[in-house]
Image (cartoon, rainbow, N blue to C red):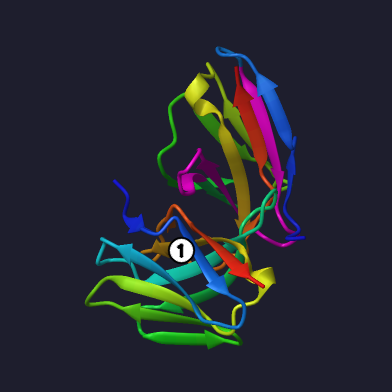
Amino acid sequence: DQQVKQNSPSLSVQEGRISILNCDYTNSMFDYFLWYKKYPAEGPTFLISISSIKDKNEDGRFTVFLNKSAKHLSLHIVPSQPGDSAVYFCAASAVGNQFYFGTGTSLTVIP
Amino acid sequence: DSGVTQTPKHLITATGQRVTLRCSPRSGDLSVYWYQQSLDQGLQFLIQYYNGEERAKGNILERFSAQQFPDLHSELNLSSLELGDSALYFCASSVGGTVGEQFFGPGTRLTVL
């Protein structure tokens, strides 16, 4: 049972434009969400997080939006750069419990 | 470099065999997590240890076991291996035992032939 879903396996964006990666979840008890970025042959690296008391968190070019009523979060990257090309995983957890990861979205930023 | 080390990087073995994957967490991190990533799958949480004690259990098979030693390194033991166990196995660590950022190692790629 996939509690966190990333329905787009891949996304291509022109350099300088906005990349929007989406993530849906089913468990209403989730209250902490993270995005990880993964390059080939490396482990995932933490990108940005958001708790359920917020609906937006921004860190430089990266912004995560949370819509609790829709059980949806998204990651916006503006402007997109070729170095952003990677696989992006979203993850969610309920306090004190394990993290559930999505299947990832492969982002390609075209120069 | 996340500071989390995993050995070996690659492991090729046969069905029915037993292997041990090793993880050293970042200095100061008390929690170690193990994840499995099969082809086209997300990261599946297997198990978490916090300061030597099992803290949480996910979709870990009975053929798999793990432990965290006093020096905080962890080992994941996989036995009676099947073809379907072929996957990337990641270890991650964090300072605390609950919510928070996890730092991932580079993974061990296990191939069962």
Q: Of B100 and A2, which appears nearest the observer?
A: A2
Residue B95: say if magenta: no
Residue at point 69% right, 43% down? B23
- B50 relative position to A6: left or right: right
The answer to which image quadrant residue B7 occupies is top right
Q: Is mark 1 on a helix, strand or loop?
A: strand
Q: Of A6 and B2, which appears nearest the observer?
A: A6
The outermost residue toward the left is A69
- What span is in magenta? B18-47
> Residue A62 placed where, x, y %?
55, 81
* Residue position for label 1: A90
- B83 relative position to A40: left or right: left
> Residue B106 placed where, x, y %?
70, 49
Q: Which amino acid does label 1 sit on?
A: Cys
User: Does residue B78 lie above or below A25 as drawn?
Assistant: above
The answer to which image quadrant residue B78 occupies is top right
Residue at point 42% right, 86% down? A56
Residue at point 47% right, 47% down? B45
Quadrant of the image containing the C terminus of chain A: bottom right
Residue B40: say if magenta: yes
- A75 relative position to B11: left or right: left
User: Does residue B45 lie above or below B80 as drawn?
Assistant: below
The answer to which image quadrant residue A45 occupies is bottom right
